Structures are given as structure tokens and as C-alpha cells.
Image: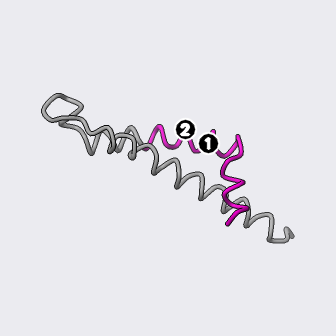
Amino acid sequence: MKEILKAALTKKIAASSLKIALAVGTALNLVNQWSAIFGIAEFSWLHGLLNYLVPFCVASYSAAKNQAANRREPHP
């Protein structure tokens, strides 16, 4: 697990995860807070932040786990 967390913090994975989080988080905010964005309800900053944080964490973990698995498996 420590190896995966270390890999998730590399510049390459973090940059890639950030791009994914921006795209997915924006879509999630539009879907989940449509009425707040267009002035009908109050915007929830916590939910807005989580809509970006969760995709970032998932993308980082997935890329790091994949990278760790590729290092352990012998290539033909």
C-alpha cells in the first residue's frame, strides 16, 4: 500500500489525475448542483470540492496501482 501511495504522488500521475478531476468534477458539479449554479438554490462548497476531490483520488489510486502491478509482473 505504501508503494501505491508513493507512486500516486509522482508528478506524472498527479498531473494526469488533475486533468481527469477537472473534467469529471465539472460534469458532476453541473449535474449535482445545477439549481445552485443557475441561482435557484444555495451552492454547497463542500459538495463542490468533493466533486473534484473524489475523481482525483480515484484516478491517482488507479494509475498508481496499475503502475505497481506492471512493475511486479514480468514482461514477455
* 40 or 70, nearer to the observer: 40
Of the 4 image quadrants, the one containing the N terminus is bottom right
Binning the other alpha carbons within 10 Å of mark 1 as few (below 14), some (14 to 19) or many (20 upward) gives: some
In the picture, the disc for residue 7 is none
Which span of residues is magenta-colored? 1-24
Where residue 41 appears, as percent x and y from the top left, is 15, 35
Mark 1 vs 2: CB contact within 8 A: yes
Q: In this view, does 71 lie to the left or right of 4?
A: right
* 74 up-or-down from 45: above or below: below
Q: Is residue 75 left or right of residue 18?
A: right
Q: Distance between the residues labelled 1 and 2?
A: 5 Å
Mark 2 residue element: helix
Q: Which residue is drawn at 80% across and 64% down?
A: 71
Where residue 66 appears, as percent x and y from the top left, is 68, 61
Q: Is the magenta stretch mostly helix, strand or loop?
A: helix
Q: Residue at x 67, y 47 (%)?
A: 9
* 12 up-or-down from 57: above or below: above
| Residue underneath mark 1 | 16
- Residue 7: image quadrant is bottom right
Where residue 70 appears, as percent x and y from the top left, is 76, 64
Three-letter residue code for mark 2: Lys
Mark 1 residue element: helix
Q: Does the magenta stretch include residue 13?
A: yes
Where residue 60 appears, as percent x and y from the top left, is 59, 52
Q: Is residue 43 left or right of residue 4?
A: left
Q: Is residue 58 magenta?
A: no
Three-letter residue code for mark 1: Ser
| Residue underneath mark 2 | 19
Q: Which residue is drawn at 85% across and 68% down?
A: 75
Q: Residue at x 38, y 45 (%)?
A: 51
Q: In this view, does 27 lie to the left or right of 11?
A: left
Of the 4 image quadrants, the one containing the C terminus is bottom right
